[in-house]
Amino acid sequence: MSSRTRETVASLVLGKLRVDAVTQAQALAIIDALVEEGTGGRVYTPNIDHVVMAESDRAFAEAYDRAALSLADGFPIVVTSKLTKVKLPEKVSGSDLVMPLMAQAAEKGRRVFFFGGAPGVGEAAKAKLLERYPTLQVVGIAAPKVDLSASDADLRALAAPILESKADYVLVALGAPKQEIFIDRVADVVRPAVLLGIGASLDFVAGRVKRAPRWMSENGLEWLYRLNQERGRLWRRYVRDTKYPYIVLKHYLLGQRSQGGR
């Protein structure tokens, strides 16, 4: 994040990850400011699964350390903040952010690039978005196979079309933790582009995967809807996420001990 915006944003630390206390409107303004200032940057949307994975995935945690903006993706994160000094004002998930961001891109003439997702998803998302925002500039779509064991040079070669396109906003749909680690390794060479890890959001926009009804999303039940849709893939994740309360409690107690020892 630029020094100017960083100074004005309060943050909460959950486990090894920082979460910024901003509204959706503030997030949109900061993302555009990063482009305007030529800073570029990394924007992630942590949920409780990210908090759990960061405990054992060093590269994932380090990617978050360099995030320009870290937005609360899910009600459990927001609810947890109510027990701390830093209260998160609202949920700002990647799937909720994409459409307002595309509206902002169309209004301000920002250039957009879609990276990742299954073959054809980016094209389908572009078609849907142009129906709604005819002036939107989608300047590139790429869905390559990304192997994080590859060298930095190889990963930067995959990102070369982003640089050539002069994109302002890059939606990276590789899923966590791959998208965050990929973004972290290429962000500096494609600035001033702002890269956002958006998970399955391109699938939602393209209509390939249905989102939960609004009432479920607004009441913290979107996870249940997605589990019913993708049981085979998601049940392991939700079992893993039972570690979240213990991680938060552990870091809270460690923090209390550290403060007591000063």
Image (spheres, rainbow, N blue to C red):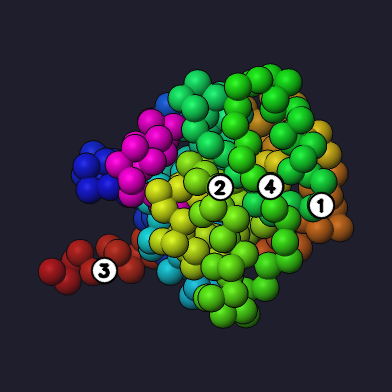
| Amino acid type indicated by mark 4 | Ile
Task: Report the residue at 22% width, 42% height from top.
Answer: 4
> Which callout, 1 or 3, points to the residue nearer the camera?
1
Give residue 81's position: percent from left, percent from top.
Answer: 41, 44
Give the mark nearer the N terminus: 3 vs 2.
Answer: 2
Magenta extent:
26-49
Numbered tag placed on residue 119 in the rendering: 1
Element type at marker 3?
helix
Task: Report the residue at 73% width, 21% height from top.
Answer: 131
Numbered tag placed on residue 169 in the rendering: none
Marks 1 and 3, how far apart in space? 50 Å
Numbered tag placed on residue 257 in the rendering: 3
Q: Which residue is mark 2?
A: 165
> Which callout, 3 or 2, points to the residue nearer the camera?
2
Asked if the residue under mark 2 is in contact with the one under mark 1, i.e. CB atoms within 8 Å, the reply is: no
> Which callout, 4 or 1, points to the residue nearer the camera?
4
Q: Which residue is mark 4?
A: 141
Marks 4 and 1, how far apart in space? 10 Å
Give residue 218's position: percent from left, percent from top.
Answer: 62, 27
In the displayed orientation, state which residue is furthest to the left. Answer: 262
Element type at marker 2?
helix
Marks 2 and 4, how far apart in space? 10 Å
- Position of residue 29 relative to residue 184, above or below, is above
